[in-house]
Image (spheres, grey):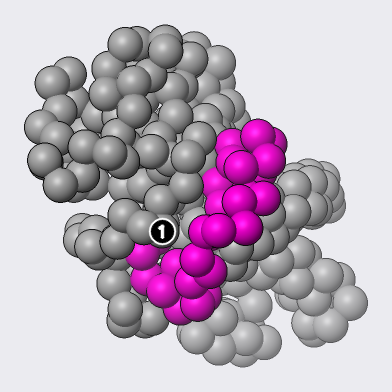
Amino acid sequence: MGQRIHFVVDPQGWCCMGLIIFVWLYNTIFIPKVILFPHYEEGNISVVAVLCYYFFSLFCIASLFRASVADPGKLPDNPKIPITEREYWELCNKCNMMRPKRSHHCSRCGHCVRRMDHHCPWINNCVGEDNHWLFLQLCFYTQMLSSYTLILDFCHYYYFLPLKKENWDVFVFRHELALLRISAFMGLIILGGISRLFYTQLMGIFTDTTSIEKMSNCCEDISRPRKPWQQTFSEVFGTHWKILWFIPFRQRQPLRVPYHFANHV
């Protein structure tokens, strides 16, 4: 569960994901060279500030790659249905295969995904039961990295002591203003978009509804029991240990969910 490699052949998704990787590379290369390393060498910031930036950068790209290649919960061609759970399965009218309730058929990927939330072109993959936790980590660390970058851009001009700049022949210092303006522009755009998406995702987990269920108004089923938020988050991340919710370098172990909580899609 969640350990198989899943690769989607979609040129549009490749372009979107390539754009995200470009922004990540741009900030990971130029921000340390223009701001972090020069100010650290002159004693304006501590090594902790440098390490924190690379920490957010590493966790951001790790969650991106893992979310993009992780199996979101694709159903096998001939799923084995336990006798005690047959009433909680249904027939997909698009691929004519049996699937658990709360699954959805992705027209772009061409198969059904367990507890599918949506298909995200920015990771070139569906967001489903087995990689939803990685998508949430991607949103979180992208916000942290974008916010940190914007703070550094601001402090470089309005808070930190001026640099001596003895190496004006270096490219990054000759074009410092242009580089940081581009960085700030990309940071604002990404932070604004990802914050809204992250908020929507959090609200979906709090209410135990997917984006597809919200659009189809399935969440109006008043007979469905309401779970505490700790339980819904634990089911998404596959563990009750909250510290592990923030670590992308692990394997998710799905928790056993009673089927009486299931919702029909």
**For the point 27% across and 17% down, which residue is it?**
97
Q: Secondary structure at mark 1?
A: helix
**For the point 15% across and 28% down, which residue is it?**
79
Residue lying farthest right? 158
**In the rendered image, the vertical position of residue 12 relative to residue 171, given as above or below:** above
Q: Is residue 263 left or right of residue 189?
A: left
Residue 91, position as x, y percentages in the image: 34, 21
Instruction: Please rate how many residues cluster around mark 1, counting C-alpha atoms within 10 Å: few if below 14, some from 14 to 19, many from 20.
Output: few
Q: Which residue is mark 1?
A: 261
Residue 218 visible in the snapshot: yes
Q: The magenta stretch spans which residues?
A: 208-237
**In the rendered image, the vertical position of residue 186 relative to residue 133, given as above or below:** above
Nearer to the camera, 204 or 148: 204
Nearer to the camera, 119 or 235: 235
Residue 157, position as x, y percentages in the image: 86, 71
Residue 211 visible in the snapshot: no
Q: For residue 147, what is the image quadrant?
A: bottom right
Residue 89, position as x, y percentages in the image: 30, 34
Q: For residue 195, what is the image quadrant?
A: bottom right
Q: Is residue 122 magenta?
A: no
Q: Is residue 32 left or right of residue 159?
A: left
